Amino acid sequence: MSSDVLDDSHRDLHSEQGALPGEHVGRASDPVIKVHDIAWLEFEKPDLAAAEVFAHAFGFSTVHRSAGELVLRGTLAGPPCVIVRKGVRSRFLGPAFRAADAHDLLRLSSATGTNVRALPEHLGGVVVDVREPAGALVRVVADVIDHPELPSQPAHTYNFGAAEHPRINATQRPPREPARVERLGHVVLQTDRYRASLDWYLKHLGMIVSDFLFFPGQRERGPAMSFIRCDRGDTPADHHTLAMTLGPRNRYVHSAYQVADLDALAAGGEHLKELGYQHSWGIGRHIQGSQIFDYWRDPDGFLVEHFSDGDLFDASLEPGWAPMTASGLNQWGPPATPDFLGIAPGKEPAREALAMASSLRSDNEFDLHRLLGLLKVARS
């Protein structure tokens, strides 16, 4: 592909500018395997009943329930979206990615010195558990059970512009009901070893970067966030299946679940609001990924997103580069809220502040200059 074509892609599709000479290329030359997609996310929570009530209001369906585990799915055919295990406290356990087949798990197992083992019967298939450089658990699965498709949100008929008016003598009344989750789209994670973790995902799971963000005034120090997609060759994949950002500690940031359209997202949000759940930010449209978004807090404080109309890229597109700013998070919609940015009063921001102090005394990538860059992002 010529540099002119890549430059046009940067301007027209996903970024104002591409990489400068010597900057990160956003992919590994010879990855161990190439994961096909994200499979599910795993959490621990003390109250599975409350977790299930919120899950149904958010738009999930229960596919398996026991005294110690809750498994949630979307309407599209495939594996579950979320697995919640009963625990003494609420915490994120890690993501699971789906390999093309079990042979990939053997290659990953050999490269990482781990074992392939069977998953429980209600999940099916096999798994390899590995640790990335920051110590976070990453699961790669194959041959898991694909559940059949469920009824999806009814499609709407739209009257657009002056030429097309297919809806005559009929009203448009989307009900205020749960926005039916179709599938898990992506997870966003923070790490204090961003570059090492990023390179690990590219090398071991064969993922590729769609967009890099850097702290304002610190481009020469390299990126501080990346939006990473699966490499499916000529077959388009979500703009990002995983996003990683540099911060003072390793933590879950949010996860995103696809719904049918803006009406489903908005009416589903009204339903959650009527039930008294906490709205975090939205409705708006992102820049990186272009999704229409709406963010909510579950009863345990985890940030979850309804999204629709996201970008799809094939493997030919090179990474874009842009500065990281709070005002650059959306093309339209309300400004990012203190809750979404993690600066509203509360336990989680307090933990983040304590982590900032301790991380500056630790062996990681989050130094004083990076801290100043992150604070500048929050003020932007």
Image (cartoon, rainbow, N blue to C red):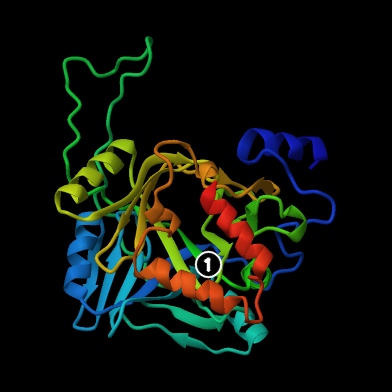
Number of disc labels: 1
Q: Is residue 249 left or right of residue 53?
A: right
Image coords of residue 118 (percent x, y): 43, 85
Image coords of residue 265 (percent x, y): 30, 43
The image quadrant that residue 59 belongs to is bottom left
Label 1 amino acid? Gln
Residue nearest the viewer, comparing 150 with 272: 272
Q: Is residue 253 visible?
A: yes
Q: Is residue 231 visible?
A: no
Could you tell me which quadrant the N terminus lies in? top right
Up the image or down, 313 lies above or below 242; here it is: above
Image coords of residue 322 (percent x, y): 66, 46
Residue name at image x 37 percent, y 10 percent: 162
Residue at the disc numbered 1: 190
Residue name at image x 42 percent, y 61 percent: 254
The image quadrant that residue 15 belongs to is top right
**Dot 1 crowding, Cα within 10 Å, few <14, some 14–19, many 20+:** some
Residue nearest the viewer, comparing 234 with 370: 370
Q: Is residue 85 left or right of residue 362?
A: left
Q: Is residue 326 left or right of residue 336?
A: right
Up the image or down, 123 lies above or below 187; here it is: below
Residue name at image x 62 percent, y 37 percent: 13
Label 1 element class: strand
The image quadrant that residue 349 belongs to is bottom left
Q: Is residue 124 left or right of residue 314?
A: left
